[in-house]
Structures are given as C-alpha cells and as structure tokens.
Amino acid sequence: LSERLQSALQKLRGKGKVNEADVKAAMREVRLALLEADVNFKVVKEFVSKVSERAVGQEVLKSLTPGQQVIKVVNEELTQLMGGSQAKLSLTSKPSVIMMVGLQGAGKTTTAGKLAHYLRKQNKQPLLVAGDVYRPAAIRQLEVLGEQIDIPVFSMGDQENPVTIAEKGIAHGKEEGHDVVIVDTAGRLHIDETMMDELKAIRQEVSPDEVLLVVDAMTGQDAVNVAENFNREMALTGVVLTKLDGDTRGGAALSVRAVTDCPVKFAGMGEKVDALEPFHPERMASRILGMGDVLTLIEKAQANVDQEKAKDLERKMRTQQFTFDDFLDQMDQVRNMGPLDEILGMMPGAGQMKGLKNLQVDEKQLTKVEAIIRSMTPEEKQHPDIINASRRRRLAAGSGTTVQDVNRLIKQFMDMKKMMKQFSSMTKGKKKKGMGR
Ligand code: GDP
Ligand code: MG
C-alpha cells in the first residue's frame, strides 16, 4: 500500500501549482491503492470524497508547496480514519479486568502475555488467567509464557467451566494484591454461537473493564468482518491488531475503526513478548504514506529556525561572508530541532534508504566541533585563513581535542565555503530563468 500511495502522491509533491484535475487524478490512484490494499470499499469511497473536497478547496499555505498540502490532507484523513488519537486502556476497577476474545490463532494468548509484560513496565502487577479449556495445551502455553516473563498464571485445569475459572481467577488476583487480571479465553476457527454464548457468560459474570478483540491483521477484510460481528454481540472496548509485522497491505488497520467504530488500542508487531505497541493513528498514517513524520519535521523546522537569522545566513552565503560564528549559530539551530538521528528518521524516504538504520549521527563529533570553535578568538572565527599550525595546536589544547580534529574541521569549513560559492552561483542562474521559488 505504501508504495502505491507514494507513487500516487509523488506527482503532487513539489508541484508549484495544483489544480482540480491534478487532485482528481491523484485521488483516482489513491482510491485504487486503497482498494488493492483490501480496505473496505465504503471506507475508501468516503475517504476519497473527504480528501478531494478538502484538497480542492484548500487554501495554499505560504510555507508549504500545494502538493505537500494535499499530502498533508491525506495524512490527516488517514489519521482520522484510524481514530484520530491514541485510544488508551481504561482500567478503573480493583483489580481491573481485561478479557481477551477472538478467533483461534488470532493471537489472544500471545497478546495476553505481551499485555501483562507491557503493563508491568507501567508499574502494574498483572495476573494471567488461563480460560481456554478447549484447545489442547492452551493452558500450558500461557504458563510457559508466564514463566518466561515472570508473571503468575492462574489455572484450574481443563475440566472446569471457563466462567468459574474467570471468577476464581479474579478473586485470587484480588487476594494476592494484583491490580490487573488478564483473562485468556478460547476461540474457534469461525464465529459460532457456542463460543459467543460462553464469552457473553464470562463477560456478564465478571464485568471486565476492557473486552479486547484480538484479530489477525493479515486476514484483511475478514478481520474487519470478525470485528463487526464480535462488536455486535459483545460490545467490545477495543481491538488489538496482531501480525501487523507481516501485514503488507494495511487493509484491516485502515478500516476496522471506521467500520466498527471500535478503537484499535494495540498493535502486535512480532512473536516476541515485547512486540506490542500502543496503536498511534498518526504514526500509522505516516508509516503508510511512507513519509516518516515529515510534517512534524516541517513544523519543527518552522518553529525552531529563526526566520531572520535564516535570511541573514542566506545573504552571507551569497556574499561569501560566512564565518565560524555563523557555523556555530547554524549548528545551534539544527540542534534545537532535536537529536540528529531522530530528525533523520523523520526524513521522507529515509525508511527506504539502505544503511540509514546503521547510521548513527555522532553527537560527540558535534560537541568536539563546538568546543573547537568556541576556543577560537573572534579574529580567528572571522578570518579562518590566519589559523596557522601553532594556532591549531593551541585550539586543540584549548578544546581538549587533537590537532587532527582541528585540521579536519577547518578543512570541512573551507570545503563548505567553496560549495556555497558554487551553490549560490547556481541558484542565481536558476533565478534568472525563473526556476527558483
Ligand atoms: P490464540 O489462538 O488466539 O491464542 O493465538 P496464539 O496466541 O496462540 O497465537 C497464534 C500464533 O500467532 C502464534 O504462533 C503466535 O506466535 C503468532 N502471533 C501472535 N501475535 C503475533 C504478532 O503480532 N506477529 C506475529 N508475527 N505473530 C504473532
Ligand atoms: Mg490461545
């Protein structure tokens, strides 16, 4: 889905002007991309009409190109589609009870363990209750999981009634001072009445704070149908989408909220116990659009870069008056935006860039650079040409670095100046031809 959406929107990105026909053409492709990703067709229809309406009527922001503005609208509507903001667990009773429901193989037992692990990190004391008495070895599976993450598991074997097990489990949890009790239940391969009746009986008896439906995201619209059915019968409080790590299409993630009106609260991202994430619609939307958090980045940049200073800098670049003082200033501005590797992570396309993951931006290196520049005299900062060998030795000693570090920095600075010279003559050329902004 990401690729198709990206290519659909690529044509708009960076366009100086966007007219209605451009938007229409892009929306046609967006529509196809969504349908191909197995997003519910009603959801697609409504989504496309909303985006088109907003995009065509959109007043163009000065700071962004109109193409980006359309992408921003798509991003916002995708976020909205998935519920807008993060839906958190609501745990109020003591102990709070979370009931896991869903079809067989969806990931209930695994998610129960992950959730216990997640909650303990939030300083809770969870208890797991083994309520699946049908699937062979289901109890054992939960017990093994509990051992692995060091969380107690309450079980009564497979001869008891699940309602009784849930009740006793909660009572046990209360006695032992647990503040959250997570009840695992049995699923079937398909929705059937016996299963629903049993789950309803448990729900009735223990009135859980949360009834979480676990669905397999890889099953696409089937997952959405399952959610619709369960929600009708059980009044769910939330959905957990598992196996998102293997879901390349995203159809379930995009439609389940819109179709059922039930919020997605967590996403399963793998088989390991820590592979559970709170579901963030805005992050998911950005991920789907494959643009990192590019809009956050733009906003951050706008908020942090002092416009006056930026203009000043541009003038200096053009007139070749760029000094080490400006260099330092610029470094500060970049730093104000946040840690460099975080910024890089937000760059569009950075996701596809191979090797970027291993690229660690060396903050230490930056600190060195800063120390060296701060050791310079005002004259040295203004006229780097005068920094001879003895001055370099002094700078190294004064900044706690080596002469090699100083040499490298000065060379970088000179190279940068040279580059700016070429760059500014290039942009001048463009401006003449009317290609500049
Ligand atoms: P249950 O029948 O609903 O209790 O499902 P299980 O918890 O036994 O999980 C079924 C299978 O799905 C197991 O092999 C799990 O390891 C796997 N599984 C569960 N959640 C995830 C997930 O988020 N990602 C991946 N890749 N596998 C998962
Ligand atoms: Mg299970």
Image: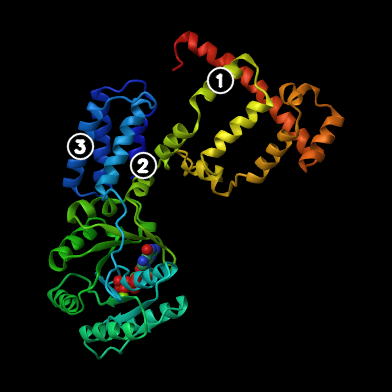
- The residue carrying mark 2 is 289
Q: Is residue 176 above or below residue 343?
A: below
Which of the two discs, 2 and 3, labels the residue nearer the N terminus? 3
Work out which residue is located at the far front of the displayed protein and give it.
378
**Alpha-carbon distance for marks 3 and 1?**
42 Å
The location of residue 256, given as percent across then percent down, is 23, 55
**Please, what is the three-letter code of the amino acid marked with disc 1?**
Asp
**Alpha-carbon distance for marks 1 and 2?**
35 Å
Image quadrant assignment for residue 35: top left
- The residue drawn where x is 59% and y is 46% is 359
- The residue carrying mark 3 is 50
Q: Which mark is residue 216?
A: none
- The image's colour scheme reads rainbow
Residue 262 visible in the displayed image: yes
Crowding at dot 1, Cα within 10 Å, few <14 / some 14-19 / many 20+, comes out as: few
Front residue of this view, candidates 83 and 268: 83
- The residue carrying mark 1 is 312
The location of residue 395, given as percent across then percent down, is 79, 35
